Image (spheres, rainbow, N blue to C red):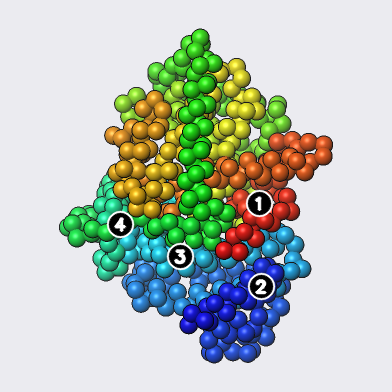
Amino acid sequence: MARKKACTLFLFKHSRLRGSITALAITVLLGPGYTTTTQAAVNNPGYSDLLALFEDWRAFERPPLFDGAPDYTVETTARRHRELKTYQARLMAFDTEAWSVAQKVDWHLVRAEMNGMDFNIRVLKPWQRDPAYYTSVWAQQSDTPAHEGPTHHALVELWTYNFPLDAQAEARLGAALASIAPLLQQARGNLIGNARELWVAGITNLRDQAEALDELGKKTSGAGTAFQSALNSAKTATTTFVSWLEQQAPSRTGPSGIGKENYTWQLRNVHLVPLSWDEEVALLQRELDRALSMLALEEHHNRKLPPLKAIASPEEYQLRAAQSVIKFTDFLENEDILPAYDYIEPALLAHMGAFVPQESRNFFLTVSHYEPLALWTHWYHWFDLARMAKQPHASPVRRGPLLYNIFDSRSEGMATGFEEMMMHAGLFDNNPRAREVVWIMLAQRAARGLGSLYAHANIFTMKQARNFHVARTPRGWMRDDLDLLGFEQLLYMRQPGYGSSYVTGKYLIERMLGEMGSQASGGLSLSDFFSQVDEQGVIPVALLHWQLTGDDSQIKDLLSQ
């Protein structure tokens, strides 16, 4: 069997990296049961056939139902892992040599998604190791194309409903709630993993679900009998599941991190980030050092200026937030930063937030209460989501959210990078103290990313990762007594690579900006840069780099190891 795998890998590596895999390799990969008729059909498929495969793949990726809930049982998952190989073989059969770069990029996206499923089954195993995987109820929309972290296939997205419910919405929501009880019953048999910290921390997510269902009950007290039955069943199943998790917790004693080798494999083969665990550690440490040193220099430069004062009332918050939205949109237009997107101001106004008392402010609320404009620079997230809704990409592969959080280097990297880019572009020239906030935000992202890297290597416990995160965030703005800290470090343990993606994605985008600027003989305007990036969809930066610069060295690097 080892010789078969080696033969397949050899054939793939030596087919011009982006070329075809031979019929012999397909037979080796799938075994003698793979018919010659099928081989002939896939010898020279074209791009339209890739789109057909993508449609088949996405349908397959959703598991079958078992008792009304997605089936993650051991037997079904093992069978689906075997079946995955047939989809991977179909993909590897494409001869893409004559395709456009954009079409080749789509091929790599499908490959990354298939690798994501393979990695989840072989290594991550969230349905076995991660109780939080069985969280169904989501009260808020994520600011990324899909929810951060592994999620199952029957989510209940409360934020998509308007209350009070009409009859149609009540029936739809009731049907969604009805899947919770059988899923949690199934989970008791599936959760055979021994990842202690994932287990203990994940219980919080299910407690939050119980509270969300209680709140839903208050909002739907007049609903019909069928709806109330589904809701009550979901509430009972959730509370009893929490009790079961608590009872089982003492028996879970193993590590939760996946280790450096697995981390690097997922980084390079699923998220298409051309770095290793060690390289990410070096990069994030450098960015943490840079952020802290730049903050010290900014503080010295501004030492004669009055310090920033936090917003002190709801009225002041609404006024300053609205004023900063206007200032930001004017800056983006007047300085030719972004194209004239008509959704920027509505997106910002819809996510301004509200005044929060000081004792309840987490890190990002602290930022917004000192300088709302600094937080708005991170809201490139909402620009992305608005564009995906209003101007969907022509390619079905890029139109919706990529699976397995493959969007993270672009989504989180752009939102984080835009903060510093706008500072350097002059957004805070008339308010130098606000520049300090930008460096504090970067330090926080680098510190939490480093903590998550060490946790996945099982060098840190999650508690040590949280302590590291708090200690290296300036001014005490990252508090250990609020939910945000536990939420972030749990997410990054659940989704390897996500905690570092803010900084690594930022670096890759800055690198791409530099190369595109060097290639532009007459100079590159920022609006041209961002419009070109946005037009490609929310895809890994390494693929953006290839499509926008013609330089495929990062992709070759990924394929060569």
Q: Are discs 4 and 2 less than 8 Å apart at CB? A: no
Q: Residue furthest top?
A: 304
Amino acid type at circle 2 is: His
Q: Nearer the viewer, mark 3 or mark 4?
A: 4
Q: Position of residue 172 (x, y in %)?
A: 41, 58
State the separation of the CA atoms marked 3 and 4.
18 Å
State the separation of the CA atoms marked 4 and 2.
38 Å
Q: Position of residue 45 (x, y in %)?
A: 70, 76
Q: Secondary structure at mark 3?
A: helix
Taking the spot 51% from the left edge, 16% from the top edge, the residue there is 300
* Pointer 1 or 4: first along the chain: 4
Q: Is residue 223 at all visible to an observer of this figure?
A: no
State the separation of the CA atoms marked 3 and 2.
24 Å
Front residue of 458 and 240: 458
Determine which of the numbered discs, if any, sits on residue 255 in the image. 4
State the separation of the CA atoms marked 3 and 1.
23 Å
* Pointer 2 or 1: first along the chain: 2
Determine which of the numbered discs, if any, sits on residue 14 in the image. 2
Q: Position of residue 310 (x, y in %)?
A: 42, 19
Determine which of the numbered discs, if any, sits on residue 119 in the image. 3
Q: Nearer the viewer, mark 2 or mark 1?
A: 2
